[in-house]
Amino acid sequence: MAALAWLLIPFLAAIGAGLWGSWAGRNRKAAGDGVELAGYTRFREAMERREAMERSDAVAKAPSDVL
């Protein structure tokens, strides 16, 4: 009887591991990449505006102002 009790421990551990594995591998409904892509688009547009402003400032300055 004691041997059966010792065999019960790995049996329950295997059942627990199977339940956890099925829970961890479940398909989750993702929100999608829309939020991340919108943030990246805003970042890219801001960087493009900054570069355009820097170029227009460099063109607007006279050569004597640059030195």
Image (tube, helix red, strand yellow):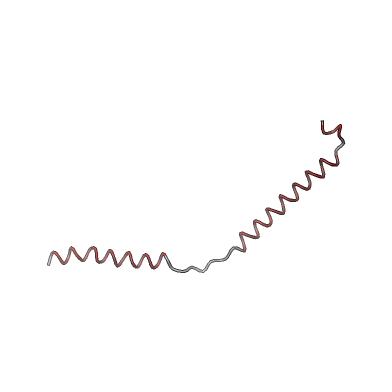
Up-down relation of residue 23 to residue 47 (above or below): below
Residue 65, x across and y down, in percent? 85, 33
Residue 36, x across and y down, in percent? 61, 59
The image quarter containing residue 38 is bottom right
User: Residue at coordinates 85% horizontally, 38% vertically from top-left?
Assistant: 61
Residue 10, x across and y down, in percent? 24, 63
Which quadrant does the C terminus fall into? top right
Residue 21, x across and y down, in percent? 37, 65
Residue found at the very far top of the displayed protein: 67
> How many numbered callouts?
0
Judge left or right: residue 40 versus residue 50. left
Judge left or right: residue 47 versus residue 5. right
The image quarter containing residue 1 is bottom left
User: Residue at coordinates 86% horizontally, 32% vertically from top-left?
Assistant: 64
User: Residue at coordinates 19% horizontally, 65% vertically from top-left?
Assistant: 7
User: Residue at coordinates 79% horizontally, 46% vertically from top-left?
Assistant: 53
Up-down relation of residue 47 to residue 62 (above or below): below
